[in-house]
Image (tube, rainbow, N blue to C red):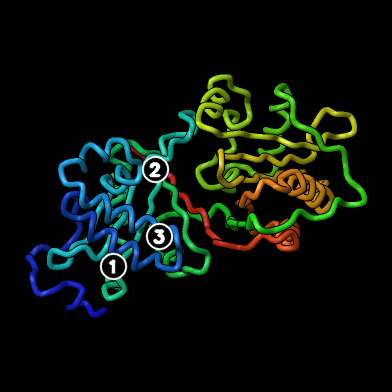
């Protein structure tokens, strides 16, 4: 599509960056997201949702208060070219624990192909950083496809640094469980009082300076410490969590852990932690055990895991997991006068 066709015959004078106006911009943002993230089914789904929401008229303001996607879009900025949306950036609170600072997520950085290499993306992200700093944000985070070297270079030029690269894996519900390994360690459920041992393992292998546990999952005690209210909330919402571990011989520490988070009728999300001294020894037994445990449940399995862990990557491929995305997590720390 040419620039003239994209702009259409009717145009207005304004060209440049301004805050998002959901009533007038939502449909244009939907088209932009669909165009720029067309290789991702999630991008198509987001665009479809936005198109539907753009038709809600007077209800849009009310929906913005309860829809997190709309709220993040509403805090963002668009670039207009003769009155039409050709660029977008979204901003949303990271919702990290308060003791980790006030962080924001920068997302949906998109520029129409006919208007790229004009500094629009840089202007949009710079405006987003100004917005975050004005709200006393202490850091900004984003994720970018590993192969998008141009975007990574742009973000580095704007002061972001790369924390770690993660691969998003998916295993189809159609796969059969593997056969039990000839030799298996003793695998058991973690007890509540052992949360500190699992947290210590996580701090060692997934430190926050390297992106923590994964996207929007910092390594923090609240994700490991038992909570009656959180357990009740998960029960009422149809969620579940299992923490399978391998203890050290003296039972004072945890050598490996595999957390499984489930949603009623939905997929399961796995999170694997293995002590460096056990690398290549416990990854396969834990995965083998959990895959056999899910035999017959017909669940798709998802996992976000560091790309630099080549041993685990090989095991995941052997067990039928497919690479869906390879994403670099980036961060910029913000200073205030």
The residue under the point 29% across, 64% down is 32
Q: Which residue is mark 2?
A: 104
The residue under the point 44% across, 66% down is 153
Q: Relative to residue 215, is residue 252 drawn left or right?
A: right
Q: Which circle's residue, 2 or 1, is located before the other in the chain?
A: 2
Q: Quadrant of the C terminus?
A: top left
Question: As displayed, is residue 45 above or below residue 202?
Answer: below
Depth check: give the residue in front, 337 or 26: 26
Q: Which numbered tag is attached to residue 68?
A: none
Q: Which residue is mark 1?
A: 119
Q: Quadrant of the N terminus?
A: bottom left
Question: As displayed, is residue 305 above or below residue 146?
Answer: above
The percent coordinates of residue 108 (x first, y second) are 36, 56
Q: Which residue is mark 3?
A: 43
Q: Which circle's residue, 3 or 1, is located before the other in the chain?
A: 3
The percent coordinates of residue 311 (x first, y second) are 76, 59
Question: As displayed, is residue 146 above or below residue 301?
Answer: below
Instruction: Give the Cα distance between marks 2 and 3.
Output: 21 Å
SS at mark 1? Answer: loop
The residue under the point 68% across, 35% down is 242
Instruction: Give the Cα distance between marks 2 and 1.
Output: 23 Å
Question: As displayed, is residue 303 above or below residue 137?
Answer: below
SS at mark 2? Answer: strand
- In this view, the mark in front (2 or 1): 2
Depth check: give the residue in front, 5 or 107: 5
Q: Quadrant of residue 188?
A: top right
Q: Quadrant of residue 309?
A: bottom right
């Amino acid at each position: 599509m040419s620039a003239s066709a994209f702009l259409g015959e009717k145009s207005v004078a304004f060209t440049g960056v301004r805050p998002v106006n959901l009533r007038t911009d939502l449909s244009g943002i939907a088209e932009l997201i669909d165009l720029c993230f067309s290789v991702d089914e999630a991008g198509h789904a987001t665009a479809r949702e936005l198109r539907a929401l753009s038709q809600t008229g007077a209800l849009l303001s009310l929906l913005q208060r309860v829809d997190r996607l709309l709220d993040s879009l509403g805090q963002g900025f668009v670039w207009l070219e003769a009155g039409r949306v050709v660029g977008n950036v979204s901003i949303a609170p990271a919702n990290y624990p308060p003791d980790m600072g006030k962080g924001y997520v920068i997302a949906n950085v998109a520029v129409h192909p006919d208007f790229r290499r004009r500094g629009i993306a840089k202007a949009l992200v710079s405006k987003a950083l100004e917005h975050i700093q004005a709200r006393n944000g202490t850091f900004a985070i984003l994720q970018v496809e590993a192969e998008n070297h141009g975007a990574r270079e742009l973000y580095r030029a704007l002061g972001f640094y790369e924390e770690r690269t993660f691969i998003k894996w998916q295993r189809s519900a159609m796969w059969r469980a593997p056969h039990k390994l000839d030799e298996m360690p003793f695998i058991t459920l973690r007890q509540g009082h052992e949360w500190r041992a699992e947290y210590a393992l996580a701090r060692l292998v997934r430190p926050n300076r390297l992106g923590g546990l994964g996207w929007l999952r910092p390594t923090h005690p609240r994700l490991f410490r038992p909570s009656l209210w959180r357990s009740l909330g998960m029960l009422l919402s149809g969620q579940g969590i299992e923490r399978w571990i391998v203890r050290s011989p003296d039972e004072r520490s945890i050598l490996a852990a595999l957390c499984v988070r489930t949603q009623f009728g939905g997929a399961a999300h796995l999170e694997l932690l293995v002590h460096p001294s056990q690398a290549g020894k416990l990854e396969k037994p834990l995965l083998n055990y959990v895959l056999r445990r899910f035999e017959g449940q017909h669940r798709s399995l998802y996992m976000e895991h560091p790309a630099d862990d080549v041993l685990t990557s090989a095991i995941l491929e052997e067990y039928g997991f497919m690479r869906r995305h390879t994403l670099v997590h980036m961060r910029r720390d913000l200073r205030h006068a």
